[in-house]
Image (tube, helix red, strand yellow):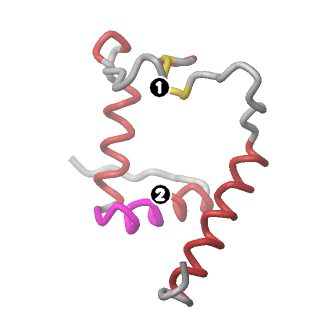
Amino acid sequence: MKTTLDLPDDLLMEAKSLAVRRRTTLKAIVESALRREIRPSAELENPDPEKYELGPFSILRIKKVPGAPEMTLERIRAIQDEIDDEDMQKALYPHRS
């Protein structure tokens, strides 16, 4: 069945980018996200209960480690920037250790 969705531009771009990185389609990303959202929490599988827990709205999340800094959006972006910088260096200089 076909339908039309009105999404914010930034969300659509992120979804398309994710699809490219996963070598799949936007349709597959949206379908997977909807299935996860609709599935009853009792059906969700926790791959590692020592590392993960079911958070609000039955979304799987990493358990907080006592003494570890809180994971904020700013911290996540900083980590992603660091990973992106490392990947760029590896791409530019593949023979460096």
State which quadrant residue 77 falls in: bottom right
Q: Residue furthest left?
A: 1
Residue at 41%, 28% (x, y): give it: 37
Q: Residue at x 26, y 51 (%)?
A: 2
What residue range appears in magenta?
Answer: 16-24
- Main SS, magenta region, reads helix
Q: Mark 2 — residue?
A: 15
Residue 39 location in percent, x, y? 32, 22
Which badge, 2 or 1, comes first in the chain's sequence? 2
**At 38% from the left edge and 14% from the top edge, which residue is drawn?**
41
Q: Is residue 68 above or below residue 7?
A: above
Instruction: Give the answer, above or below, for where 26 lies relative to 63.
Output: below
Kind of residue at badge 1 = Leu
Asked whether, in this view, residue 75 is left or right of residue 55, the answer is right
List x then y, in percent, for residue 31.
Answer: 31, 44
**Residue closer to the observer: 51 or 74:** 51
The one nearer the camera, 40 or 54, is 54
On screen, residue 34 above or below 95? above
- Count the numbered circles shown: 2
Q: Which residue is mark 1?
A: 60
